[in-house]
Amino acid sequence: MNTYAIIEAGGEQLQVQPGRFYDIRLNVPVTEFWENRKIVFSRVLMIRSESNTFLGKPWLEHATVNGRIFHPRRGNKLIIYKMRPKKHTSKKNGHRQTFMRLIIDSIFFNNQNL
């Protein structure tokens, strides 16, 4: 079985594996210098490595997940349509959520690369 970790990022929990891409919500403005910037997640809830499982209460101490921001992207457009009955008024609005696509480089636990 592959090594994976469950982290908390962007208000949600993600199951991540080294070498894979993930989209997370970050509430920061999108700028040019974000690409190839290293990011470290210290809120690791669980690590599974071969036959070993480590659980945190609520987070694991001395556990980090290292990754790089690949590029910012935007999600699909959501249409918000509000209509007031019997008033002949309506309002149509749209929204696109900003995501950061990142690649996970490594999972560390007790200063060992898993």
Image (cartoon, helix red, strand yellow):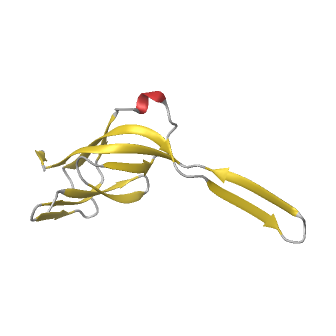
In the rendered structure, the answer to whether residue 45 lies left or right of residue 69 reads: left
Q: Is residue 105 above or below residue 14?
A: above
| Res. 92 image quadrant | bottom right
In the rendered structure, the answer to whether residue 74 lies left or right of residue 21 reads: right
Find the residue positioned furthest to the bottom: 86
Image location (x, y in percent) of residue 56: 23, 62
Residue displayed at 21% across by 57% down = 4
In the rendered structure, the answer to whether residue 26 lies left or right of residue 62 reads: right
Q: Specify the quadrant that holds the N terminus.
A: bottom left
Residue displayed at 16% across by 58% down = 2
Residue displayed at 13% across by 46% down = 113
| Res. 45 image quadrant | bottom left
Q: Nearer the viewer, residue 60 or 88?
A: 88
Find the residue positioned furthest to the front: 76
Find the residue positioned furthest to the top: 33
Image location (x, y in percent) of residue 93: 71, 53
In the rendered structure, the answer to whether residue 58 lies left or right of residue 10 reads: left
Numbered label tally: 0
